Image (tube, helix red, strand yellow):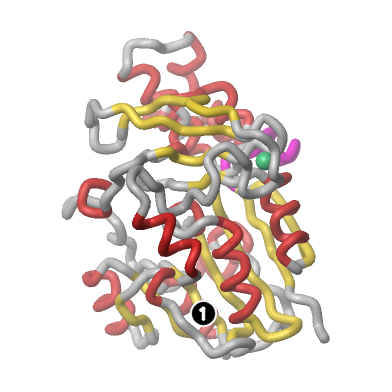
Amino acid sequence: MSESDTQNESAPGAVPWVEDRVRCGCCGAQMQLDAIRSPDRFFSRDDVYTLDACPDCGTVVLWAPGWDAETAYPSDYPAHAADPAVKWYHRALPRYFFPAVPKGSPDPIVEIGTGTGQFLAYLQGLGRSVSGFEMDEAAVERARAAGIAVQPGTWEDFQSEDESVGVLVMNQVIEHLLQPPAGVFAKTLRALKPGGAWVIRTPNAGAWGRHHFAGYWHPLEVPRHTVIYSLRGITQLAERAGFSVASARCCGRWYDFGQSARYRIDAGAARPWDYLLDLRKVGSPFSRVLAVAANARGRGDSMEVILSKPDR
Ligand SMILES: [Zn+2]
């Protein structure tokens, strides 16, 4: 942890993942403060949180002085119930189910936030050398039982020799981190081997859903999501940090449209089309079509970005 991080955490009212509230951590533009307000809809709590937004690159940042992990992640947070077994359909359609790991990328692969280790099990089956960190102890046990080298811990616990990691994977994880974005990017760059890759899947703050649903947008997920990047913001920060962007695409799912609509219905603020987007009993056809269209336009609710560290 750098000296500036330590100072920030000890300052009264400080928010650990915010270096400078008025300047965007991705592009440097002046932030719009209190741009969005939302309660923790997942746990149906009433406390309203404030989020700041960058008018330039779109990045959204939770502003939550006094944030603590026990409140954000209660013991009934259903982190990792998924079955770790890799099934035939995962192998048939890996690009749908899993993040892409670049062909020819160096080993080892390290995943932060492995859940029950399903993705690492898939990669291990392809002959890759894998390990990871997971904060949920039950999930760590399940991963270990499946023969995957997962240790309990978070991004903050991950320490590696410089230039020792071939591929770092964060699948729906970077938006939960408690370190300012510039620090996250610098730490990853140091850890990666030259020619190594950083594979990120995360909500897309440039999504249609973010603008349309505002405080009802499901991926806001307050107070667990701290920084929600946009494609534009993450690209600018990556290039400034010394990465090059190997690929970037949207991979949003119907679920975010359906859940955002559900939140607005539950709050008594529904628009007529919210009932169409929420049609889960018949397979959510409208949300599915909308997700495909949004992804094609680069406005999907989730994105996959692969950054590479230049070869020497
Ligand atoms: Zn910005």
SS state under label 1 = strand
Q: In this view, does 71 lie above or below 306?
A: above
Check disc 1 and report the residue beneath it: 110
Position of 102 compared to 87: left or right?
right
Depth check, front residue: 55 or 166: 55
Kindly identify the residue that appears in the image at 26 percent across and 50 percent down: 68
Is 298 covered by the magenta stretch?
Answer: yes
Q: Quadrant of residue 195?
A: bottom right
Q: Residue 225's x, y, as percent?
A: 43, 46
User: Magenta stretch?
Assistant: 292-302
Kindly identify the residue that appears in the image at 59 percent across and 87 percent down: 162
Q: How many labels does the image show?
A: 1
Q: Quadrant of residue 261?
A: top left
Q: Is residue 300 visible?
A: yes
Kindly identify the residue that appears in the image at 38 percent across and 25 percent down: 262
- Is label 1's Cβ within 8 Å of ligand 1? no
Depth check, front residue: 82 or 71: 71
Q: Residue 233's x, y, as percent?
A: 69, 46
Which corner quadrant holds the C terminus?
A: bottom right
Q: Residue 3's x, y, as percent?
A: 48, 68
Kindly identify the residue that appears in the image at 27 percent across and 67 percent down: 136
Position of 118 compared to 40: left or right?
right
Depth check, front residue: 295 or 17: 17
Q: Quadrant of residue 143?
A: bottom left
Extreme residue in the right direction: 312
Position of 106 compared to 168: left or right?
right
Q: What residue type is labelled 1?
A: Val
- Ligand 1, by image quadrant, is top right
Q: Residue 211's x, y, as percent?
A: 59, 25
Label 1 crowd bin: few (<14), some (14–19), many (20+), radius 10 Å: many
Is 266 covered by the magenta stretch?
Answer: no
Q: Is residue 289 visible?
A: no
